[in-house]
């Protein structure tokens, strides 16, 4: 059965303690959001296997604070003889937990912020404390923690999480393979549903249904079609239209993301509804697909991410679309891809930037992508998920 065992969670906690200690921290706090947002959950989940399903609700003074969030406290030093006395402590407002239980000591509290402060005070010596997942922590909670913990300095330290999660374990890679396969099935279901007369909502429903039936989690999508295909999605909360009906010859593009046991797939496809593409549509489709596939060939250990991005760009610039229309602004701001795991994460694959000189390593999972658009032709996206192996790239969204 696919999944992460308790032993691996324990090893992750030990590795995080070492990373934090080497960086001069006295402890680690992982903070995550849950509910239906399907983002900012990775840090607590990575260390304990726990996902908080209670959605966020505003604070109610005297009753609860930070509902829909969870935290893990992990001291760096182990005061017990033999070094086996420190356990990760998980703080949550979920009173009843199903099996498998989190790989941590569980503390249930309605006020996550004050309980977190007390846990830090009693288990972490005064000094610098690494805070990972800080983007999900609201300013009032941050200020409260700083005010009641004068001897502890909370330091934003997401780089520790990125470093810990950069290379995936064999169990993680198997989950990513399963996730990529599910993503392909979901996009295939969407394509089957994209017939003349169907709505974008019909197409979205087919993809989401495939994900949910398989026990995966639907995270989100960007979908557009016809005269709106150059956009990413509708401007309202629903990314698809229940009114816009597809016509033969329309371009439809979908960027779909979901997960299997927390591990993401992120892939994009574009096609023509009910017929063959025009010459201009073919040029558009070929440009995004062939430039991404060219970059995949360079995802081999020892290559640099800047090289991968450069190859993608060179192939795109030689495409028939670019020759005839010039170089439209890419909708990804020069980004050709990113790391993939429990989140969209570093390395960021660009010709410049901080990760350009970073080395491709076996055990990484990355998504390569491109989206371009022209009002006169339409828009197209293509994205693939790839595991880097010792022998080269393994395409998991074929």
Image (spheres, rainbow, N blue to C red):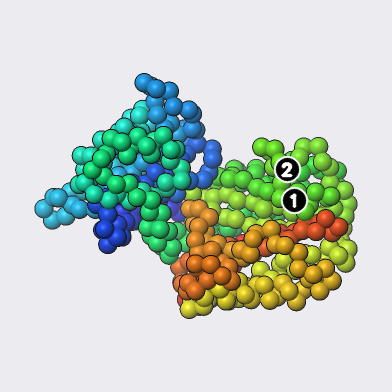
Dot 2 crowding, Cα within 10 Å, few <14, some 14–19, many 20+: some
Q: Position of residue 176 (x, y in %)?
A: 51, 58
**Is 121 left or right of 384, judged from the image as shown?**
left
Asked whether the beta carbons under mark 2 and mark 1 sit within 8 Å of each other, the answer is: yes
**Is 392 left or right of 72, judged from the image as shown?**
right
Position of residue 356 relative to residue 255, above or below, is: below
Q: Position of residue 219 (x, y in %)?
A: 58, 45
Dot 1 crowding, Cα within 10 Å, few <14, some 14–19, many 20+: many
The residue identified by callout 1 is 231
Question: Which residue is more in the foreground, 21 or 300?
Answer: 21
Q: Position of residue 146 (x, y in %)?
A: 32, 39
Question: Which residue is more in the foreground, 52 or 159?
Answer: 159
Q: CA distance from mark 2 to mark 1?
A: 8 Å
Residue positioned most to the top: 62
The tag on residue 234 is 2
Q: Residue at x 37, y 37 (%)?
A: 143
Q: Quadrant of the C terminus?
A: bottom right
Q: Residue at x 28, y 42 (%)?
A: 89
């Amino acid at each position: 059965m696919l999944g992460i065992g308790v032993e691996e969670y324990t090893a992750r906690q030990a590795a995080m303690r070492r990373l934090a200690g080497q960086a001069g921290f006295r402890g680690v706090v992982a903070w995550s959001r849950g509910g239906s947002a399907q983002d900012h959950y990775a840090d607590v989940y990575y260390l304990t296997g726990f996902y908080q399903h209670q959605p966020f609700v505003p604070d109610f003074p005297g009753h609860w604070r930070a509902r829909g969030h969870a935290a893990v406290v992990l001291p760096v030093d182990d005061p017990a003889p033999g070094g086996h006395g420190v356990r990760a402590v998980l703080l949550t407002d979920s009173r009843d937990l199903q099996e498998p239980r989190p790989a941590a000591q569980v503390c249930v509290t309605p006020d996550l912020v004050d309980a977190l402060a007390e846990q830090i005070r009693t288990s972490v010596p005064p000094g610098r404390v690494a805070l990972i997942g800080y983007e999900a922590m609201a300013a009032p909670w941050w200020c409260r923690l700083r005010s009641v913990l004068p001897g502890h300095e909370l330091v934003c330290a997401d780089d520790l999480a990125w470093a810990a999660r950069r290379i995936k374990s064999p169990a993680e890679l198997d989950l990513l393979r399963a996730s990529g396969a599910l993503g392909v099935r979901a996009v295939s279901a969407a394509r089957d549903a994209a017939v003349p007369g169907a709505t974008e909502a019909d197409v979205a429903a087919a993809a989401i249904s495939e994900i949910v039936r398989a026990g995966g989690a639907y995270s989100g999508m960007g979908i557009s079609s016809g005269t709106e295909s150059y956009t990413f999605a509708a401007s309202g909360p629903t990314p698809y239209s229940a009114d816009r009906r597809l016509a033969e010859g329309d371009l439809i593009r979908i960027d779909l993301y979901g997960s299997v046991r927390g591990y993401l797939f992120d892939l994009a496809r574009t096609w023509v509804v009910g017929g063959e593409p025009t010459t201009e549509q073919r040029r558009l489709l070929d440009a995004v697909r062939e430039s991404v596939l060219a970059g995949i060939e360079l995802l081999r250990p020892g290559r640099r991410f800047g090289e991968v991005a450069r190859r993608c760009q060179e192939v795109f610039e030689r495409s028939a679309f670019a020759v005839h229309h010039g170089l439209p602004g890419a909708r990804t701001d020069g980004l050709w891809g990113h790391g993939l795991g429990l989140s969209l994460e570093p390395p960021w694959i660009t010709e410049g930037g901080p990760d350009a000189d970073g080395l491709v390593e076996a055990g990484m999972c990355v998504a390569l992508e491109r989206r371009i658009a022209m009002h006169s032709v339409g828009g197209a996206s293509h994205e693939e998920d790839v595991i880097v192996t010792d022998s080269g790239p393994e395409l998991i969204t074929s």
